[in-house]
Amino acid sequence: MSTSPVVTRFAPSPTGYLHIGGARTALFNWLYARGRGGKFLLRIEDTDRARSTPEATAAILTGLQWLGLDWDGDAVSQFDCAPRHAEVAQAMLASGHAYKCFATQEEIEAFREAARADGRSTLYHSPWRDADPATHPDAAFVIRLKAPRDGETVIEDAVQGRVTIRNDQLDDMVCLRSDGTPTYMLAVVVDDHDMGVTHIIRGDDHLNNAARQIQVYQAMGWDVPVFAHIPLIHGPDGKKLSKRHGALGVEEYQRLGYPAAAVRNYLSRLGWGHGDDEFFTDAQAQQWFDLPGIGRAPSRLDLKKLDHLTAQHMSAADDAALLHELQAYLVATDRPALSDAQKSRLLAAMPLVKDKMKNFDQLIEKARFVLIDRPVQPDEKAQASLTDVSRGILRELTPHLQTANWSRDDLETVVGGFAASRELGLGKLAQPLRAALAGRTNAPSVFDMMILLGREETLARLGDAASDAPGAPGVED
């Protein structure tokens, strides 16, 4: 058994955003490498120059960085490695594992049309495979792999199990085009070999490619890496993910207000499991993740489960780290940045407001009371609780609070004693207090808000609410 260090890679094509399925593939490779002290490499497969764009490359890098998937070394450009790919094609040609094919596209298509008409296989067998070099014309040619015609190519897949493909079902694939540029099928093998990749973890839509790629490894006498082809992600309806299912790009999940740790946790559970564990840390995921734990059936996207995990991750998150990510969320959604004073107040309030929040929008709403300035503008429900009677009660309560020690116990005693003396239930007093302090009826405990706001700000807000005139518009979050 090989004892070489584990090296995995993520190799996206820069033709668009970082798809959520691609993000999971990157995550699986990252977890596998990091959990074994190995390397996680990044290769941008930009050989399709017509579709590859710098903007898409930047979007992929940004998506990986937001998701927290750090890679080792610099990202490799597949296009930049084209001379090396051509060198390998020439080496296979020289060793007799490849040959020059002078067949034109018109000839190949004519063969296939005739085969379809006759009901024969359209698998093209080049007449140039065993031709005497002396018969080669002075014309353009491609270099084809001289694949074995007999026997089988076996893929020992760590997820799919043993997959056997008859060699007579595979054609001699083109390795080098007539213009001297390499094909993807050759380039990916050369790059993986040169980068020292030991484990190729990728979508099962590449499973058929593996048989052809193994033949290149064998032709070059290279060690074949471990293949692990993971099932694709489907939508809740069981169909392949598409725009009708909602967010597809990783950046959309950031803009929806999900913290990266929750998305990592959720994606790791799409197709992989460790017993009944649902919520876990990165350290646990790296320790537990293994290829046998990946199922063969497609997983289904379920945002309710993501919401559930997000609530757990926000509750468990470090306060300062959560504030830092919230600020990045504001930038991603083109919203105003927090002032230094707002950041300070929010950090102090974080233990109170982060619990069970399903996204950053909910957290911001719950923390609104420390982010706004006076005068507080109540929403419709809060305004309805500020009746003439409740305003009068707030005016009567204020002198009692002015002499309080401003500890939670003392505030509870003062407010509770006041409510009892007026034969009021604490709930009836709490609603106008919430409206005065937060401008919302759904807000944290009034005592928690009082402690965080402090004596001066609390009394000022109660004074504003107790006045006959409604408050002027306040600073909205």
Image (spheres, grey):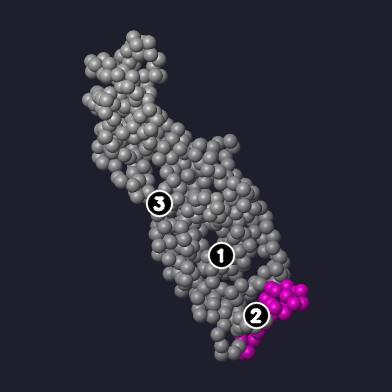
Which amino acid does the dot numbered 2 rest on? Ile
User: Residue 5: percent from the left, percent from the top?
Assistant: 49, 53
Question: Which of the 4 quarters of the picture holds residue 141?
Answer: bottom right
User: Residue 121: percent from the left, percent from the top?
Assistant: 73, 73
Which amino acid does the dot numbered 1 rest on? Trp
Position of the C terminus by quadrant? top left
Which amino acid does the dot numbered 3 rest on? Gln
Residue most extreme to the top? 421
Q: Tell me what residue is drawn at x 36 percent, y 19 percent.
A: 429
Above or below residue 6? Residue 403 is: above
Number of numbered discs visible in the structure rendering:
3
* Residue carrying label 3: 65
What segment is highlighted magenta in the picture? Answer: 111-135
Q: Residues within 10 Å of mark 1 (few under 14, many from 20)?
A: few
Give the spatial CA distance, label 2 vs label 3: 45 Å
Magenta stretch contains residue 123: yes
